[in-house]
Image: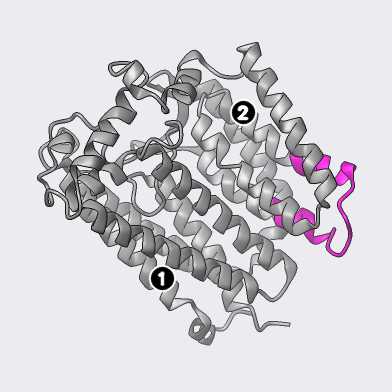
Amino acid sequence: MFRFGRFRDFDWMLLSMVLLMSVISVLEIYSATLHTKFHGFHSKQILFLLAGIGVLFVVSLIDYHKLIDCVPWAIGGSIVSLLAVLVAGQKVLGAKRWIRLPGGIHFQPSEWVKLVLIVAMARYLWGLVGRELDWREIGKAFAMVIVPMLLVLKQPDMGTALTYSPVLVVGLFLGGIVWRRALVLVVAFAILVGGAWQSGKVLKPYQKARLTSFGHPENDPKGSGYQVRQSLIAVGSGGLWGKGATKGTQTQGDFLPIPYTDFIFAALCEEHGFVGAALVLILYFLILLRLVQNAQTAADPPGTFLVMGVTAIILFQIAVNVGMVVGLMPVTGIPLPLLSYGGSSVIFTFFALGIVMNVRMRRFVN
């Protein structure tokens, strides 16, 4: 049974860094939207963060082994919710990604599916500890991730679908896949991607354009290259120290697309320059370092799998979002964890961090 005295094992250092990033998020959302039609979103972000903090503490009180026991129900619920989005989801900008709930709340099932996959992979690999993964076991791990990934691609939401892949990669790595089988999987994946690209049935035309235009946005500056081009202008114009809060011309002039979510890092670079961006990236690095440390001190393999799954998704989202902003990766619509605006993203991140706290607080339990 849980004893409140165990809060002495709570990772207060990690929570402090997360709260610092959350404060930066609110301030940057306020600054980036002050003179735009999005002004006021920072107030909603505060509510999302407060709810997220509450979720973090509640999840930390539930033994993570009980969460693992609920995997079959969670997987079933996640598949049903993704199918419900395709059937009755609310269509916004040509995509069905949200279910409208009473009270005007928009629920994005694809976000919480990340958590289900992390816990499901931990449960599955727990039973395989100490042995090499054979092809049948690898196939089951793939199926666990590919099914929801295809349903999310159908919405279409390529960005969120891609965030499921780190769970599979880390799971197979920690599960003990041998390098020969890993090499075969890499080659097979490359062939499948090439086939999917040529078929034209998996990716929409605009998604293909995003995947090919990021390297040369100047070829279509008013079309597929517009977002990357405006982002690069914002990042470059920030210089060393930036133009100052609320003074970014690209951001305040509505040239930079959605500066409070996907391109919030570009807005931060314009307003606070290289120094501000570097400090934020250092803070991310320290958070990731702390997560890995918690994985190393977990009491058992499933605890390690859970924390490393969370770490993998957060790292992936940071790398893809920052890479997208500076023109090194395609525009995929992946938010920047703890910084971008959005209720579903915030709640997912804090729920995931609650699982990390959960594992840490039980690291001395036999």
**Location of residue 63 in the rendering, given as x and y in whole percent from the top left corner:** 63, 70
Q: Nearer the viewer, residue 270 or 332?
A: 270
Sort mark 1 into few (<14), some (14-19) or many (20+) by Cα contacts within 10 Å.
Answer: some
Residue to which mark 1 is pinned: 15
Whether 100 is among the magenta residues is no
At mark 2, the secondary structure is helix
Q: Residue at x 44, y 23 (%)?
A: 210
Residue to which mark 2 is pinned: 151
Name the N-terminal-most of marks 1 and 2: 1
Q: Name the image quarter holding the C terminus.
A: bottom right
Q: In the picture, residue 19 is in which quadrant?
A: bottom left
Q: Which mark is residue 307?
A: none
Majority secondary structure of magenta residues: helix
**Location of residue 132 in the rendering, given as x and y in whole percent from the top left corner:** 88, 56
Give the residues drawn in magenta, as a range: 120-142
Q: Residue at x 88, y 42 (%)?
A: 135
